[in-house]
Structures are given as structure tokens and as C-alpha cells.
Amino acid sequence: MVTVIKAERRSSVLTPSNLACLSRMPTINLTAGCALGCVYCYTLGYTSYPGEDKIIVYVNTLEKLRDELARKQTRPRAVYFSPSCDLFQPVPEVLRLGYQVLEFLLSEGIGVAFLTKGRIPDNTMNLLWKHAGMVRAQVGITTLDEEMAGLFEPSAERPSVRLEQIARLIAGGIATEARLDPVLPGLTDSHESLGRLFSALAGVGVSRAAASVLFLRPRIQESLKQNIRDEAVLQELLSFYHDARRLAIRAEHSFITTLPLAARTEIYKRIGLMAQQHSIVLSVCACKNPDLARGTCNIAGGWPRRSRRGRQLALFGEGR
Ligand code: SF4
């Protein structure tokens, strides 16, 4: 049971992300903390993290957003949801606020991009369909094994529901990709597991996917030890990190503990081959794998840049 705390947001609604691939697009978090409670969540160590089973909903988000946009000379082309929480958490206040914010942005001609493991309510799905050309979606899914997904993502939707959701998004004309993040070494990267997943993804019309292998930080490791009650599963996973390396990632002054380069390369190669067999183009998250990937994993989808007076405008930063 999640405790929902309502609070007024004092800082800006539109905020830049630390991640290099989102550096040109403003982002919005409707909450601090996330009711989906994934045990590997990278926000666990953030100072804004309110604690387990607790979220803070910023109830004045819409008013502040209206005000911020009214003061901008150049509006963003699109906004990303969310670097630190899921837009579709199973909490009525969050879903209501999410609908209002999406409706406002889309009515103002501002596109929206999101990554979710939650369930998109029907009214929001209708809204997204209505503005399909202005929406980019990524659905997080790493395995079809419901038990495994339940262990690591206890309050996220079941993989079968996420697949259905991908199918509905694509059927409504929305550019939708799958995100295998985090791939759990030894647990979700077997030939059989990947084969089932990619076959299902291809079956619902996915043509692009992105992947990134689990990384650790002290708070994430603590969470895994506290929450993964199946000792065999936990030990199998952690055994891959015995010779883990510290790596500077493409997020301001940020370090992670991750598998050695050779081990990650081998995993991405296998995932890439499986994706290829199902005619799916795979990108590796370059922000979290700067030692082996370049460019972007398309986390916010592709957005053509606007051009005015012969110069290219950035998606974020001008007229702020
Ligand atoms: S959905 Fe994302 S932000 Fe929410 S708990 Fe899971 S990993 Fe964290």
C-alpha cells in the first residue's frame, strides 16, 4: 500500500534531465517517488526519493506549467515523462493529474514522449490516439516470465498487459518502442527468454527496441537484498557482479557499478541477434554504456527540429 502525500511544487515543472540523450528536451515528474516500486529503481539513491511505499504528488503541476509556458518565448517541441517516476502509476490522483497535463500540452501543440510499465487508462489512451502524431511511447518490458517480473517490478503491470498495451498504442498510430531495461544477467537474457520476448514483440508490431543491462549503486544493491526473497534468484544475479566495474556514465558527474565491457558486449550481441531475427532494430542505451555505444537509444522518440529564420531551434533551452 502506497502512502500518497499531496504537496505544492516550488521548483519549475519543466526541468532538464541529467541524461545526455534527454539534454535537448524538458522533462516533467508528476511525483517524487514512484508507486510501481521496482526494486532496481535508479532513483532510490536520489535526495528527492521520499522513501519506500511513499510518493509525493505535486498537485499544482498544471497551474505552474501553464504559467511557465506563458512566459516562454519559444515553447518546447515536446516534453518527456518522466526521468524519475512513471506517468501511469496506479494511483487515482496521479492518473488524473497525468491526464490533465497531457491534455493541456497536446492542446497547446506540444508533443509528449513517455516510458511506462504501468497501465494507461482508457480515457488517456483515447486522448493519445487523438493526437497520435504528437506522441512517442516506450513500454518497459524485459521478460514474459510473470513470476520474474513480479519479483523485480512488484506493482508494474504484468508483461502480458504491457504487450496488449503496446498493441493498442501501435493500433492507434502511436510510434511505440519496447525498452529492455534493465536486462537482468542470468535471469532474463537466456536464448529462450529473449526468443519468447522478441517473438511476442514482433507479434504486436514492434519494430524498434532499446536495451540496457542492470547497473548497481549501493542503495540499489541494498534494495535487491531486502526485496528479492528468492535467495537463489538473488545470488544468481549478484554472481555476475563479482567483477563489476565503476563506470562514468553520460549523466552529469554520475558513476555506476556495471558488468565489465566484455560481458556487456556479449549480452548486447545476443540481444541484437535475437532482435534481428525478428526484424526489430535494437539500440543500446549509450548514456549508460558510453564505453560501447554511440548516439542515442531514442528514449524520447524522434522529433524533427523546427527551423526558423534559417536556423535550427533546440527543443529546450531557448526563451527560458
Ligand atoms: S517505473 Fe521507473 S521510476 Fe517507477 S519504480 Fe520502476 S524504475 Fe523506478
Image (cartoon, rainbow, N blue to C red):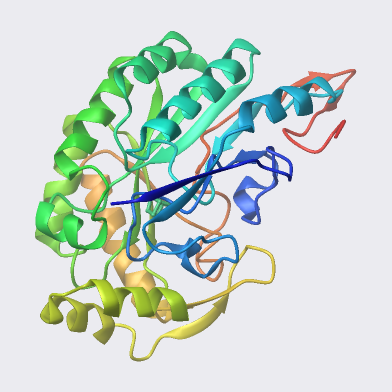
Q: Residue at x 43, y 8 (%)?
A: 130
* Residue 87, horizontal then vertical, whole percent: 44, 37
**For this view, does 177 lie left or right of residue 225?**
right
* Residue 255, horizontal then vertical, whole percent: 58, 75
Q: Residue at x 87, y 21 (%)?
A: 310
Pick the residue in front: 55 or 18: 55
Q: Residue at x 50, y 43 (%)?
A: 299
Q: Is residue 205 visible?
A: no
Q: Which residue of the protein is positioned furthest toward the right in this rendering?
A: 309
Pick the residue in front: 219 or 55: 55
Pick the residue in front: 147 or 309: 147
**For this view, does 163 lie left or right of residue 309?**
left
* Residue 98, horizontal then vertical, whole percent: 48, 28
**For this view, does 126 lie left or right of residue 186?**
right
**For this view, does 193 lie left or right of residue 253?**
left
Q: Which residue of the protein is positioned furthest toward the bottom in this rendering?
A: 243
Q: Residue at x 49, y 23 (%)?
A: 135
Quadrant in the picture for the C terminus? top right
* Residue 169, horizontal then vertical, whole percent: 32, 23
Pick the residue in front: 297 or 273: 297
